[in-house]
Amino acid sequence: MFKRILVANRGEIALRVIRACREMGIETVAVHSEADRDAPYLELADEAICVGPARAADSYLRIDRIISAAEIGNAQAIHPGYGFLSENAHFAEVCRSCDITFIGPTPEAMQRLGDKNSARALARAAGVPTVPGSDGLVTSEEDAVRIARSIGFPVLLKATAGGGGKGMRVAANDLALAGAWQQASAEAQAAFGNPGIYIERYIERPRHVEIQILGDQHGTIVHLWERDCSTQRRHQKLIEESPSPRLPEATRSAMCAAAVRLATVAGYHSAGTVEFIVDQQDNFYFIEDNARIHVEHPVSEMITAIDLVKSQIRDAAGEPLGLTQDDIRPRGHAIECRINAEDPAANFRPCPGRIDRIIAPGGFGVRFDSHATTGYVVPPNYDSLVGKLIVHQPTRREAIETMARALRELRIEGVRTTVPLHLDLLASAAFHEARIDTTFVERWLAGASS
């Protein structure tokens, strides 16, 4: 087992990894930017090293500085968290060449699954359903029109290196497609340095369901069941839950099996998430794989009682998983709300600033993963996530009731947050009745403002 791990991230996920390491008797080195110099969680690490200015491109995304910090701090391994360098295969290769263990999948598996277009091809080879669309990247407007006509409008254009909704456009006809292709390609180039675009048939009002997978270096791959992430706005998730409501058991089982099959073909180990969309007839289609720990991993932890971060660390050290699929039985219902420093009443404008007071909720089945404390300043340089509120109860109804109570109990003063939005969503009849899909929030917001 490792004696010292460098945490190549910030915020709540950095704190999550530090805590797991402390419980395992592993020392930690925390990197930070100048903007995060006074972050309270740094005091829990055994060493903190500044890796550059506030801008992520000059600090958290600088591979040379992260590697130098690991060498200075005598770290044997690096945990990348999520975001930043977590799915950068080149970074994993550099770690390997520097004899530093990357806590995650191999660079080869990341390359197979990281590019959405190649991941789709791998899924098809593994017999995993994919949305009808282009066989590869679309290189011209003419090709885009030809392919769209063959699969039928409306179509969805997606960046092959994309994420978070960037490089995505919907087109309903030839004229709209020409402009959408140019916009998506330009946005993809600006956001990811890769203008590659592929086309899929647009599935209207789908559910977004993802499967948590976990594997070791000895050939074992298991799933930790599903999470429903349909309650989202502009492809940004707001509420996640497990099990997915109204998902037929046959669809659930087939989807979980497909995720394990894809991970096996890709030669995957460590934690990861295979994402699907489910149409209104309960057909499911693979859309992408996230080769890293996921933001909403606590949902899977709560229903399975498996610590995913510790499992990642043990896998990276070469230890066997010690679990079979039959050992993993879900229990109860878990819900997670992402609490962001944003103002929903002002088109979700980010609200950086000083938190004058924060009081975390508690009680049976309540968990609050947050790096923020009273006096903490939410910087304007990064994602506005303040924390994740997670509840676990025997039934979905009880989980909704506990979440509503915990949200009312949560006090974050000094900055505006998404807490009022979460309360309103949880109180809506559509959410209670599980009449949700990926467009539910936009429709609900439009109705609330009319």
Image (cartoon, grey):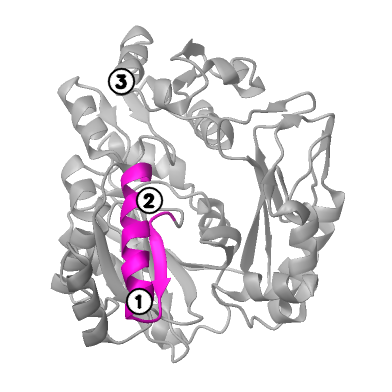
Depth check, front residue: 304 or 8: 8
Q: Is residue 320 above or below residue 98?
A: below
The disc labelled 1 sits on which kind of residue? Leu
> Who's the residue at 41% across and 21% down the image?
58
Circle 1 SS class: helix
Residue at which label 3 appears: 76
Label located before the other in sequence (2 or 1):
1
What is the quadrant of the C terminus in the image? bottom right
Whether residue 324 is visible to the viewer of this picture, yes or no, is no
Q: Which mark is residue 175?
A: 1
Q: How many marks?
A: 3
Find the magenta span and give its range: 166-191
Circle 3 SS class: loop
Label located before the other in sequence (3 or 2):
3
Q: Quadrant of residue 138?
A: bottom left
> Spatial distance from mark 3 to mark 2, Cα to Cα?
38 Å
Depth check, front residue: 383 or 311: 383
